[in-house]
Amino acid sequence: MRTTLTLLACLIVAPMTTGCHRSGEICDIICQCESCSDRDYDECIISYDALEDVAATYGCLDDYDRAYDCVMDQGNNCIADNFIPDADCGNEIADIGECIDDNSAL
């Protein structure tokens, strides 16, 4: 459950999240909304790269792909200078954490 909440927070609280070659795409959208500094943008890239790497390590890349596609396809939800994924993506985002939890030895 903790992993699920962390991953959800990562996808909602943008600059603290991850996503490899796709990280630039999502961080561009996030930072356009949140007016990121260069440092914030770099942190966003690093975070999304890390999240994608973790998902891949635990065999959850398909879940990550579905969540990423959902967030990208649902359009930009920029509310009061905060990027927020569409509520319709909640299940896809939660699936990443559940998959990691299911495949973790801890």
Image (cartoon, rainbow, N blue to C red):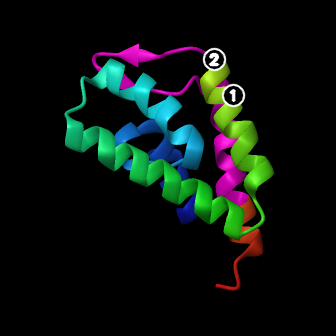
Seen from the viewer's position, the closer of residues 83 and 44 is 44
The residue at the point 63 percent across, 17 percent down is 74
Q: Which residue occupies the extreme bottom position in the image? A: 105
Residue 1 can be seen, yes or no: no
Q: Measured along the vertical axis of the image, is residue 30 above or below residue 59?
A: above
**Picture quadrant of residue 100:** bottom right
| Magenta stretch, residue numbers | 75-98
Q: What amino acid type should be assigned to the residue bearing mark 1?
A: Cys
Q: Around disc 1, counting alpha carbons within 10 Å, would you say few (fewer than 14), some (14 to 19), or many (20 or more)?
A: some
Give x and y (percent) for residue 63.
76, 48
The residue at the point 51 percent across, 41 percent down is 23
Which residue, given by chain and number where applicable, does mark 1 sit on? 70
Residue 91 appears left or right of 12:
right
CA gap between label 1 and label 2 equals 6 Å
Find out whether residue 87 is within the magenta segment: yes
Q: Measured along the vertical axis of the image, is residue 55 above or below residue 31?
A: below
Any mark on residue 38, and which?
none
Which residue, given by chain and number where applicable, does mark 2 sit on? 74
The residue at the point 69 percent across, 28 percent down is 70
Seen from the viewer's position, the closer of residues 87 and 39 is 39
Residue 86 can be seen, yes or no: yes
Give x and y (percent) for residue 9.
45, 46
In the rendered image, which quarter contains the C terminus?
bottom right
Residue 16 appears left or right of 81:
right
**Picture quadrant of residue 53:** bottom right
Find out whether residue 95 is within the magenta segment: yes
Give x and y (percent) for residue 41.
31, 38
The residue at the point 74 percent across, 54 percent down is 61
Give x and y (percent) for residue 38.
22, 37
Q: Measured along the vertical axis of the image, is residue 95 above or below residue 26?
A: below
Whether the residues at callouts 1 and 2 have beta carbons within 8 Å, the answer is yes
